[in-house]
Structure formats: C-alpha cells, structure tokens
Amino acid sequence: MTSDPSVCKRCALEGPTCCRLEPGQEEFCFPLSNKEKERIQEFQPDEGGFALQENTEGFRLHVSRLFPGEQGLIRELFPPRKFHFRLAVDEKGACRFLGRAGCRIPSELRPYYCRLFPFWVVDGTVNVFDAASCLARREAVNLFRMYDSFGLNAAQVRDLMGRLRLAWGLPPTSGMKPVKRSF
C-alpha cells in the first residue's frame, strides 16, 4: 500500500474538510456512542469537545438514509425527544478537535465515522461519499487509490463499519438482530 498519512493534514490546511459543518447544520452531525466518547475523553479529558444533541426528526431521517432498510432500528436507537452526544463544533462549524494540521485525536481513538469517512458500507459493498471537500477523493483516480491514500483495504473498511454498527447498537452487518444499545 502507498498510504498517504498526510492527506487529511493537507486537506485541513486547504480549507473546508469533512471536519466542518455549515453553521446551523449541527443536528446532522453523526452521533457518538458512549464507548467512542469515553475513548476520546481518556485521551483529552478536559477538551470539552462534545455536545448533547436532541434526536430531531431531521437527524433521524438523515441517519436512516445511511442505513437503508434499517430505519426501524435507527428510530429505536434514537427516539424522539431524547438526546445523543456528538462532537462539538466552533462558531464556524469546525470540529473542536480539528487543529491547523488536521485532527488532534490519534487515528486509533477517533470515532468510527471519522475513521471511515469518505467510505461507507451498505449490504457489504464499500461505497464512497461524493464529498467535494475530501482531498483524497479529489486526488484519487479510483476506489483502490482511495484505499491506498488511507492505508486501508476493503476488508478493513468493512471491519470499521462493523465496529461502528456495534458501537451504535446495531448488529455488525445489516439483516441481523440488534445488539445491546450503547447510547
């Protein structure tokens, strides 16, 4: 593999990244499981990088789109008028853990969603989000070059997706029974 560990750092220096939201779009930020939050807090206990977010209908619809055919499970995991944690952002929409040279959280401690992006797995197939802000996406000629940019392969992406699903309380692959809830 020809991993480019600097691709995310270079992207952060260029401008808009996957680590920034449009101000006012915070409700659509991905949720953090308790496990992910605790892992980050152990690394940076006084950072204040988390926000409590209501499970709005818009959020629930947004997350349901990421898990086709599992809308019922998503609605159970994120009931209305309840809350989940997400990464906090500043007034410009940047993640509080985003530094001038990229993410300040070591990659092995980052939330699974962050480690997966721009990849996503649906029914065992690895897909790539159409993210114009992703430098690796812009530089890569094809999916295999994108894997190389992140030092990953399809099996590792599927494994990360399975870990994300388990952390969120979903079965490791779609079509299985739910596991113990972790929010």
Image (spheres, grey):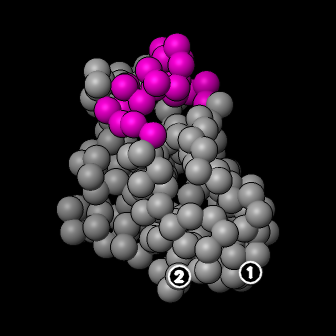
Dot 1 or dot 2: first in sequence order is 1
Whether pointer 1 and pointer 2 mark residues with C-beta atoms closer than 8 Å, the reply is no
Q: Amino acid at mark 2?
A: Val
In this rendering, does residue 87 appear at all? no
- Report the mark closest to the observer, 1 or 2: 2
Q: Which of the 4 image quadrants contains residue 81?
A: bottom right
Q: Which residue is mark 1?
A: 80
Please tell me how crowded label 2 is: few (under 14), some (14-19), or many (20+) other residues with Cα within 10 Å: some
| SS at badge 1 | loop
Residue 183 in the figure: left or right of residue 60: left
Residue lying at 47% horizontally and 50% vertically, measured from the top left: 158
Which residue lies most toward the bottom here? 180
Inspect the image, locate mark 1, and give the three-letter code of the amino acid beneath it.
Answer: Pro
Q: Residue at x 50, y 32 (%)?
A: 17
Q: CA distance from mark 1 to mark 2?
A: 20 Å
x, y percentage for residue 94? 48, 43
Which portion, as a residue range, is magenta?
131-154
| Residue 90 % position (x, y) | 48, 49
Please give the name of the residue rendered at 20% of the width and 62% of the height, measured from the top-left corner: 43
Question: Residue 46: percent from the left, percent from the top?
Answer: 25, 66
Indicate which disc residue 179 carries.
2
Location of residue 171 by image quarter: bottom right
